[in-house]
Image (cartoon, grey):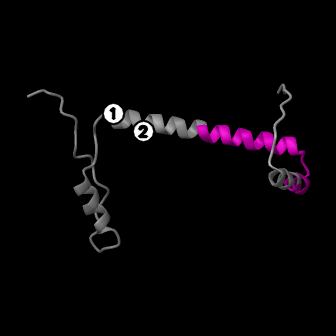
């Protein structure tokens, strides 16, 4: 993979922690920072994708009512625990 130089200012205590971790891991501080940034960007991209998928799902207008969810949750740990509820709210399509 090609690399590009990058510099930044960093809090002194964070830099000291980074240097300690680099020594423990027997890696360069640059390697650890690159992995941290990569992990951060991967996590942000995953969160964004999941959020967009959740919004798309919500836009369909199919939901579980509060009442059905409450009945289910109140049954947890009882002898008559209910299965997870099915959606019971659907969009009004305007068709009669």
Prevailing secondary structure class for the magenta stretch in the rendered image? helix
Mark 1: few, some, or many residues within 10 Å (few <14, many ≥20)?
few
Q: Secondary structure at mark 2?
A: helix
Where in the figure is residue 37, as x and y percent of width and height?
A: 73, 40
* Horizontal arrangement in the rendering, residue 12 relative to residue 95 (left or right): right
**Range of the magenta residues?**
20-44
Can you say whether 94 is above or below 18 in the image? Answer: above
Where in the figure is residue 16, as x and y percent of width and height?
A: 86, 54
**Residue 35, magenta (yes or no):** yes
* Horizontal arrangement in the rendering, residue 93 relative to residue 6 (left or right): left
**Residue 4, magenta (yes or no):** no
Residue under numbered circle 1: 59
In the rendered image, the residue lying farthest to the bottom is 79
Residue under numbered circle 2: 54
State how far apart marks 2 and 1 are (Cα).
9 Å
* Horizontal arrangement in the rendering, residue 41 relative to residue 89 (left or right): right
Where in the figure is residue 30, as x and y percent of width and height?
A: 86, 41
* Horizontal arrangement in the rendering, residue 7 relative to residue 41 (left or right): right
For the point 47% across and 38% down, which residue is it? 51
Image quadrant in which you'd find residue 39: top right
Q: Secondary structure at mark 1?
A: helix
For the image, the number of numbered tags is: 2
In the rendered image, the residue lying farthest to the left is 96
Can you say whether 77 is above or below 20 in the image? Answer: below
* Quarter of the image with the C terminus in it: top left
The disc placed on residue 83 is: none
For the point 52% across and 35% down, which residue is it? 49
Where in the figure is residue 86, as x and y percent of width and height?
A: 27, 49
Can you say whether 47 is above or below 86 in the image? Answer: above
* Quarter of the image with the N terminus in it: top right
Badge 2 vs badge 1, beta-carbon distance below 8 Å: no
Labels 2 and 1: the sequence-earlier one: 2
């Amino acid at each position: 993979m090609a690399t590009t130089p990058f510099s930044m200012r960093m809090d002194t205590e964070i830099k000291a922690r980074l240097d300690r971790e680099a020594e423990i891991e027997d890696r360069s501080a640059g390697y650890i920072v690159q992995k941290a940034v990569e992990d951060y960007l991967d996590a942000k991209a995953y969160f964004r994708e999941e959020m967009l998928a959740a919004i798309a799902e919500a836009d369909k207008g199919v939901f579980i009512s509060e009442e059905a969810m409450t009945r289910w949750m109140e049954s947890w740990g009882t002898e008559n625990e209910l299965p997870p509820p099915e959606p019971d709210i659907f969009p009004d399509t305007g068709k009669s």
